[in-house]
Image: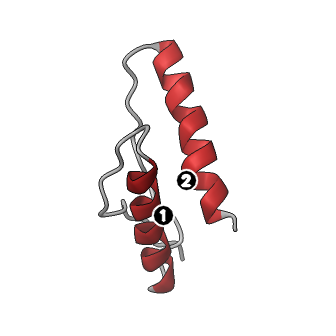
Amino acid sequence: FDVAIGARAKLKIGDASSAAAYVDSVRELASVGVTWTMIELPHPSRQGFIENVQWFGEEVIARLRT
């Protein structure tokens, strides 16, 4: 079975400390058995969405892989 839930920490795009808190929140969820999390990134425009996805990958996903 998979358990999915959104992380409780608020993520502010462009804010490294917010990314760190979000990563901690996701790791805490994983420690209690959550296997999937979801997030909706801001999408003010197509280009803005692409930039936000890139930032998310660099600041959040990369940290979760370590």
Q: Which mark is residue 60?
A: 2
Q: Position of residue 38 (x, y in %)?
A: 44, 53
Q: Can you identify the residue that label 1 sits on?
A: 23
Q: Amino acid at mark 1?
A: Val
Q: Residue at x 43, y 76 (%)?
A: 29
Asked if labels 1 and 2 touch by Cβ distance under 8 angstroms, the answer is: yes
Q: Nearer the viewer, residue 25 or 39?
A: 25
Considering only vertical position in the picture, is 46 above or below 62? above
Considering only vertical position in the picture, is 28 above or below 7? below
Residue 37 horizontal side relative to residue 10, left or right: right
Q: Position of residue 2 (x, y in %)?
A: 52, 72
Q: Which mark is residue 13?
A: none
Q: Residue furthest bottom?
A: 32
Q: Position of residue 24 (x, y in %)?
A: 45, 70
Q: Residue at x 36, y 62 (%)?
A: 7
Instruction: Choose the circle earlier in sequence order: 2 or 1.
Output: 1
> Helix, strand, or loop for circle 2?
helix
Q: Amino acid at mark 2?
A: Val
Q: Residues within 10 Å of mark 1 (few under 14, many from 20)?
A: many
Q: Residues within 10 Å of mark 2 (few under 14, many from 20)?
A: many
Rendered-image quadrant of the C terminus: bottom right
> Helix, strand, or loop for circle 1?
helix
Q: How many marks?
A: 2
Rendered-image quadrant of the N terminus: bottom right
